[in-house]
């Protein structure tokens, strides 16, 4: 986390110099391109190329490690939920059934397990580009660039505050967890089972929500006292003009979505199952 209280890390890389609005559009197009497919190979390609871009941006892995572990846990829980609710969905997609286990007349197929793995890889394919956007985009510059492309400055400023608020939420989460640990609630490996530790995180949720609501009220009152929103337009201290690099990235995004649509229609048409 930077000294400015945000997740922005200034490494003076080529990606840092790209306008915030361009990187935001890249995030949207990247996500749209990923969701066009249902193919593990495509998701793996997006995932690896995304981490290559993170390497170019010189973002250290230790900075994104907590968020990476969180998305891993999320995908695991989502996959388990999918398998429990629809244990035969994969067979519906492939038209084949390879039984793995049968419990009370319900059969879990290999096809469903592969579908769960594919779905998890889809979420992981979006993760690197999201981290790239968060860690290489200064909130103030991003807000001004959004306003420059026609987004209301009120909306742009709200996004600015949201990005700045992420580290505060993370710090508040840690403080609440330490307070709960002081009361004997286990959160660490070895102190309790995985299911017990996951249940204990519910003791953090309510205090975190109440603390967040209190912060929202304080910020909104402060902005009202300063007359925020009284004028139709505003100027930006961190505004900047588009450069040749921005135009190059924008054209690359158009090429990306075009190739993605062509590949979806002609190459990777449906769900890829490698065990047929």
Image (tube, helix red, strand yellow):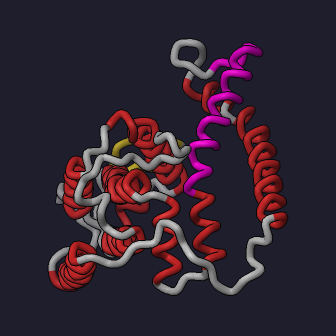
Q: Is residue 265 above or below residue 95?
A: below
Question: How far from the left and from the top, in percent, is residue 158?
Answer: 64, 67
Q: How many discs mark residues in the rendered view?
A: 0
Question: What type of secondary structure mainly makes up the magenta span?
Answer: helix
110 in the magenta segment: no
Q: Is residue 157 left or right of residue 215?
A: left
Question: How far from the left and from the top, in percent, is residue 66?
Answer: 45, 36
Residue shown at the point (33%, 53%) measured from the top left: 128
Viewer can see residue 40: no
Viewer can see residue 82: yes
Q: Nearer the viewer, residue 264 or 230?
A: 230
Q: Nearer the viewer, residue 221 or 204?
A: 221
Q: Which residues are magenta?
A: 163-186
Question: How far from the left and from the top, in percent, is residue 79?
Answer: 45, 49
Q: Is residue 193 above or below residue 204?
A: above
Q: Is residue 202 left or right of residue 161?
A: right
Residue shown at the point (57%, 43%) measured from the top left: 167
């Amino acid at each position: 986390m930077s000294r400015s209280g945000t997740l922005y890390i200034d490494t003076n890389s080529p990606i840092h110099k790209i306008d915030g609005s361009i990187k935001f559009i890249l995030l949207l197009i990247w996500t749209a391109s990923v969701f066009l497919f249902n193919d593990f190979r495509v998701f793996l390609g997006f995932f690896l190329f995304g981490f290559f871009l993170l390497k170019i941006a010189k973002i250290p892995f230790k900075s994104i490690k907590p968020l990476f572990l969180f998305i891993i846990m999320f995908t695991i829980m989502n996959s388990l939920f999918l398998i429990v609710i629809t244990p035969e969905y994969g067979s519906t997609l492939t038209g084949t059934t390879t039984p793995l286990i049968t419990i009370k007349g319900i059969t879990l197929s290999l096809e469903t397990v592969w579908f769960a793995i594919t779905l998890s890889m889809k979420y992981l394919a979006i993760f690197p580009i999201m981290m790239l956007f968060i860690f290489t985009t200064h909130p103030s510059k991003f807000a001004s660039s959004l306003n420059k492309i026609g987004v209301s400055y009120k909306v742009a400023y709200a996004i600015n505050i949201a990005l700045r608020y992420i580290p505060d939420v993370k710090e508040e989460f840690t403080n609440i967890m330490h307070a709960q640990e002081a009361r004997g609630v286990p959160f660490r490996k070895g102190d309790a089972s995985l299911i017990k530790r996951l249940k204990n995180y519910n003791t953090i949720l309510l205090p975190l929500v109440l603390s967040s609501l209190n912060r929202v009220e304080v910020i909104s009152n402060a902005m009202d006292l300063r007359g925020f929103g009284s004028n139709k337009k505003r100027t930006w201290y961190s505004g900047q003009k588009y450069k040749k690099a921005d135009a190059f990235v924008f054209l690359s995004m158009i090429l990306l979505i075009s190739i993605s649509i062509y590949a979806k229609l002609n190459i990777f048409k449906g769900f890829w199952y490698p065990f047929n």
